Amino acid sequence: MSRVIAIANQKGGVGKTTTAVNLGASLAADGRKVLLLDFDPQGNASSGVGVPMREVTSGVYNTLIGDVPLADVIRPTGLDKLFVAPATKDLAGASLELANLEQAHSRLKDIIAPIRDQYDYIVVDCPPSLDLLTINGLTAADSVLIPVQCEYYAMEGLSKLIETIELVRDSLNPQLQIEGIVFTMYDPRNNLSGQVVTEVRGYFADKVFETMIPRNIRLSEAPSHGLPCILYDLASRGSQSYIQLARELEARRPRAA
């Protein structure tokens, strides 16, 4: 059964796109067919798998605002089972254009529907905001995975996102679940990291993944080469942590009766 997972956090710099790219790649390396849908106008998920925005003439924007089928913009990547629906610079104005369209909040859900069953996972990289693009991502998703950086304002940003998720669940997508919270940029030598982990685990309990993503130079370098980290340096701590996260996600996945 296909699963649509939105990677979301309105705070920038928390490892959202890094998580979307490397979790998607790790699932694909494990044999799952994965579509990485770049819904962030910055286009970093696209370039992170070797499809820079400057080379894209038709992408998610054209399916969202125009009449181009999503299947027509999907591209292969360096992993056989990982595909990408890339962003273009036009996506930056999509929120304003969406506001003038019917069913503005569910456009993404509608364009995913025809190809959904072709993939085991569709991973939606949402923008670092709570605008109409992110609302579309949450409305289309079965669940939300929330990357949280181990820093002082983590809980404040997390609480705002949870409020938005609850609003979407109440009015647009009653089936929306929290897939889990994953700590990113974790440094065990930093006392603050430990405090944030303790506080978030105390509040969200089993919604927090056991796997934590460390600060890792290889994770930072890989995007400049247009590669997920597992293709850049498989042995690195960054790669191994996302492989472990993918396994933990798979273990949590609801099974068909």
Image: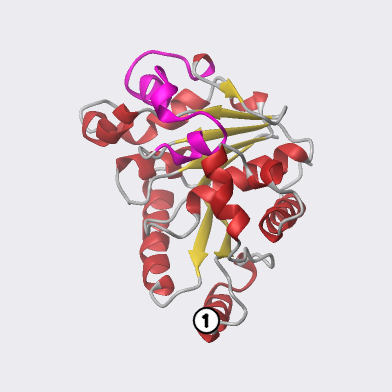
Tell me which segment is drawn in magenta: 43-71
Residue 103 can be seen in this image = no
Q: Residues within 10 Å of mark 1 (few under 14, many from 20)?
A: few
**Quarter of the image containing the C terminus?**
top right
- Element assignment for label 1: helix
- Residue 6 in view of the camera: yes
| Above or below for 125 versus 163 | above
Near-viewer residue (24 or 111):
24
Q: Which residue sits at x=49%, y=35%?
A: 47
Residue plotted at (35% across, 39% down): 133
> How many numbered discs sit on the rendered protein?
1
Which of the 4 image quarters holds residue 235? bottom right
Q: Is residue 53 magenta?
A: yes
Q: Position of residue 88 (x, y in %)?
A: 37, 27
Q: Is 157 colored magenta in this rendering?
A: no
What residue is shown at x 40% (from left), y 68% (from top)? 159
Q: Quadrant of the N terminus?
A: top right
Q: Position of residue 15 (x, y in %)?
A: 50, 56
Residue 182, by quadrant, is: bottom right
> Residue 33 vs residue 167: left or right?
right
Colour setting:
secondary structure
Q: Is residue 35 left or right of residue 52?
A: right
Left or right: residue 19 compared with residue 166: right
Q: Quadrant of residue 256?
A: top right
* Three-letter code, disc 1: Glu
Residue situated in front as seen by the camera: 217 or 9: 217
Residue designated by label 1 = 199
Q: Position of residue 121 (x, y in %)?
A: 64, 37
Above or below — where is 95 with respect to 254? above
Picture residue at 43% right of the left edge, 71% below the top: 154
